[in-house]
Amino acid sequence: MPAGAIAANTQFSVEPISNTLPGSPGIAYRLRPEGVKFAKPLTLQFTYNDADLDSTNEEALFMAYQSNDGIWRMIPKTQLDITQKKLTVQTDHFSDWAPYAMFWLTALKDAVKPKETTSLVIHTTENFLLADLTKNEVEIAKEKVLESAENVKNWKLTGAGKLVPDAKPFLANYTAPEKVPNPNPVTVSVEVHNFIPPGKIPGRGATGKAILFKKIRIYDDTYFYGTNGGVEYNTLQHWFFEEDGEEVMLIGGFTGTIAHIGLYLPKASGPGTYRMNMQGMVYIEDFSQAGKLLYNTVYTHCISGDDINAAGSIEIEKVETVNGVKYITGNFSVGMFKFTSCSPPVKQVTGQFRVRDRRSY
């Protein structure tokens, strides 16, 4: 903080929160105190990783904040350092901050069975291409598809299967091969052109092109994969859930030093979104191969004794019974605390899963 930015001694804090920003590839943070106007601008810096770029491109990344009126606003003058993977802005206030992608690519299903088809769509926010990027900030409107044909080019598939671009430029359909391929997942990419006029934003728009990527996994029965602190993990094992009198426990495996992760939900949880809440038994644990608890979505502050919950949620997309076997499909994105100090560091963990009843094995 620059000298003279604030007159009195002030306590500052940074807290991970649930991210409500459309087109945001990372976790959001609440910077406090809110509502304080600094006499000199402060520098905020966000570090992204390769996992944050699954669906978007670093050329499309900016920082954004949410004000008290609930509106998110992006900062066109966000400085991008591709080498260091950093986004930097100057601000005279604290609030909720998150990275924002001008464009991102989504799949109706991130995981499909052999011969199954899924659709891919390019998203942006309403009227974004008409925004005046010379302003200090631009309001982020509601999410929409990118309908401008002149901005979309060159749908491409890397891997097995078939990709067919639709007559609508923002849409393509992918069909998986007859059996699970190797390598797996496959990658779909598409180019977005001319979204920043040259010279409008220093260091931006020099090429006028961003390539969006989306990975699609092909599976036979169950799966459990995602990112762990920005590093991709995947397991080829079959994973399961089990129920007792109070909760549902979903187990997934990690590669490397992490053996498995456990997701805990109230018993008989149906489709819906479940926020991190220890009282509601919605939490995640991350264990080492020796069975030692490394990370959790909740920790007890060593001085105040308060339970602190990380930002994030588990989404149950589908609960189904196939040939007499019960399956649960969903995803999660959470911040997780490491038990090292009063203010433990937080890492981001994401996952996609389809698990079956353990009793069926």
Image (cartoon, grey):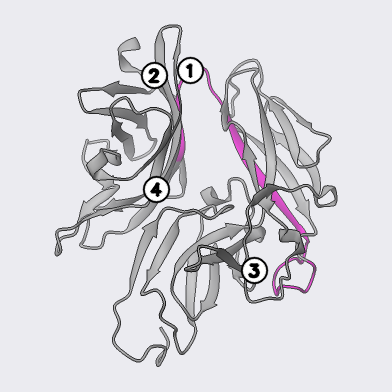
Element on which disc 2 rests: strand
The mark that comes first in sequence, 1 or 2, is: 1
Tag of residue 221: 1
Region rendered in magenta: 197-226
**Tag 4 near tag 2, CB within 8 Å:** no
Circle 3 or circle 2, nearest the eye: 3
- Mark 4 or 2: in front is 4
Where residue 356 is drawn, which disc sits there? 2
Q: Amino acid at mark 3?
A: Val
Q: Nearer the viewer, mark 1 or mark 2?
A: 2
Using the image, determine if residue 155 lies above or below residue 28: above
Relative placement, left or right, of 85 versus 146 is left
For label 3, the residue is 138
Question: Which of 317 and 232 lies nearest the eye of the viewer?
Answer: 317
Q: Which residue is mark 4?
A: 312
**Which amino acid is tagged 2?**
Arg
Q: Earlier in the sequence, mark 4 or mark 1?
A: 1
The answer to which of marks 3 and 2 sits earlier in the sequence is 3
Q: Where residue 89 appears, x then y in whole percent?
A: 54, 74
